[in-house]
Image (cartoon, coloured by chain):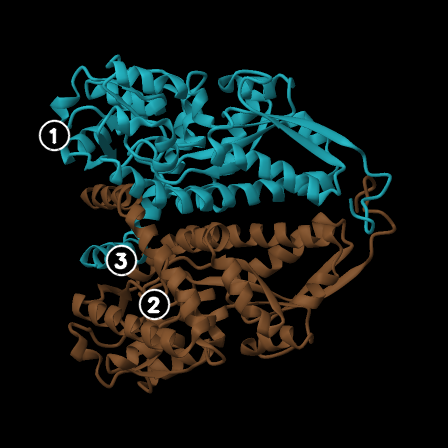
Chain colours: A cyan, B brown
Amino acid sequence: SVAMPAIAQSAPEVKWRCTSSFPKSLDTIYGAAELMAKTVSELTDGKFQIRVFAAGEIVPGLQALDATQNNTVEMCHSASYYYVGKDPTFGMGTAIPFALNTRQMNAWFLFGNGLTLMNEFYKDYNVTMLPGGNTGGQMGGWFRKEIKTVADLNGLKMRIAGMGGQVMAKLGVVPQQLAGGDIYPALEKGTIDAAEWVGPYDDEKLGLFKVAKYYYYPGWWEGCAALNFFFNTAQWNSLPPLYQHALTAACARANESMLASYDAKNPVAIQSLVKSGTQLRRYPNDVMDAAYKASHEIYEKLSTENPKFGKVWNDLKAFRNNAYTWWQIAEFNYDDYMVRARSRG
Amino acid sequence: SVAMPAIAQSAPEVKWRCTSSFPKSLDTIYGAAELMAKTVSELTDGKFQIRVFAAGEIVPGLQALDATQNNTVEMCHSASYYYVGKDPTFGMGTAIPFALNTRQMNAWFLFGNGLTLMNEFYKDYNVTMLPGGNTGGQMGGWFRKEIKTVADLNGLKMRIAGMGGQVMAKLGVVPQQLAGGDIYPALEKGTIDAAEWVGPYDDEKLGLFKVAKYYYYPGWWEGCAALNFFFNTAQWNSLPPLYQHALTAACARANESMLASYDAKNPVAIQSLVKSGTQLRRYPNDVMDAAYKASHEIYEKLSTENPKFGKVWNDLKAFRNNAYTWWQIAEFNYDDYMVRARSRG
């Protein structure tokens, strides 16, 4: 569409497919992949085209990584922690309980050892990763009944996936795996007692507030949730450097934009949910403490059994402990004051 | 350096100069402009070259905006709040006391009205702005004596610029304007009693801990500090769309990268400072409350006197109040728990 300058006629036409693990209805997450693709096109005068496909259009959402590994598609937009069944090390590419907040995660990826270590791990799966957006800190899920102590969790059927589910299981919960669209009817019928999804903006669209009144925080298993762009490594290597640069810059833009989008949308949604009768509840201290302890027991056990996990976890843990040494000072106290000032009106 | 694909021979060679308001010694901030320039070059196969100049090489740091407005340079990397002397509205492009934290600032810029409103304001100065990095929440400065109540501020000579200085003046402080390199000797000789600079990483390099023992937090006048890329609007408009896209993507990458870099460096620096004998102190509540009140009195007065300020402040204030309504739930309580868990060991 642009007369001058055009990328040279010698620039190759490259067409890639990016399979997303997400439906279009998760518009903020799905939109990050679309922004990535649009930016790549803009940066190459339309010569490098990436078409994004919603979950299920090429492969089911949870097979996005396999499709990339097997070169069915050149890349995907997914969440590393969907693949903890293959190896728990995958968890640390997105979120594990009581780990980093969003800014710390970006810092670990870009200026700590995070991206290097994770990409070393991903080598066995023929993929290379770049950060692909973040939801920010998530909520702790919807409950039909109030949770006042850890004993109230006993026997509760909760829709919660991944490592958060393993920790909840240690606290007595019976974790359930359900796709997004199945949560509402299950909660309505009472087939499940609780469910976690994302945060106010996405949760409101599922309508969960109509069938479960208590909305818990914080989502201690997802202090942030990093999405990921995975590239088939051979495909990445075959790209001309100019296109690698375009793709790198486009992913960085999508990474930043998705977070800012959630940070603008969630404040509106949480107020709307409260107006609709949602009761906000903080997880009781004994639940938080039991979950913290159980999580670290799992990490220690996994580190012993699985050297790959141990290598990344040791680095992540040290980064987290350092990061919070600083966070607790200026950042936390600024937010603390602003929260108090606001509540005074 | 790349054989194929190259940008077409028809793509114009464009050479721009970017004057930075900062010395190279502020390597994290200065580095954001260098990363921007490097990325633009990579994205255009070297056809669009931007050379970054440190403060003083072309014009003094605080004349970066004027140099861009007057087309002495095509662009600059600066901080909008350096220009509050022209109009206080400039403050809101970087930081004003008790406003947004870093993520909220990015959200206001990109998905609120922030960037639109600020660029509407900047039109009178012939410049267009894109976000250019963020320091994160800053520290509240170095004091030779402890501050236990607002009365202890009375008559204190403090190196503090901009709107933070105006608020401090209402609390009895005598604000001093000093360049970075002049702070250490002034504090050593006792010409000044206190000084604020940036945060642990940059402050440690100035050596302020050797001449002032008490390091206060939070930096309530800079809950975040957004840097800015300003472009001469006619120069921006003259760029081929491909180059505009490259510059936009490069700025987004620099914006994200600078923050992540500080978030990785500050934790190391704060621990080093504490080992060197620095005493961390939280600003007393009465100081915070007096500063909060004084800030909002200033904002109300400015809004009455200056419709431009009022228009942006009303939008910023509403965004802030909404943003903290959400922030106080999942984000704040996650950090709160992690801080407590860490201090338990």
- The quadrant of the image that shows the N terminus of chain A is top right
Give residue A69's position: percent from left, percent from top: 59, 20
Q: Which residue is mark 3?
A: A338
Element at label 1: loop
Q: Say which label, 1 or 3, has the lower sequence index.
A: 1
Q: Which residue is mark 2?
A: B97
Which residue does the image show at 55% across and 76% down from the upper left? Answer: B61
User: Toward the viewer: B234 or B198?
Assistant: B234
Give residue A82's position: percent from left, percent from top: 44, 22
B51 in relation to A166, above or below: below
Q: Quadrant of residue A235?
A: top right
Which residue does the image show at 56% across and 45% down from the upper left? Answer: A253
Q: Quadrant of residue A302?
A: top left
Q: Are marks 3 and 2 on the same chain?
A: no
- Which chain does the residue under circle 3 lie in? A
Q: Quadrant of residue B157?
A: bottom left
The amino acid on which the numbered mark 1 sits, given as a three-letter code, is Lys
Element at label 2: loop
The answer to whether marks 2 and 1 mark residues whose Cβ atoms lie closer than 8 Å is no
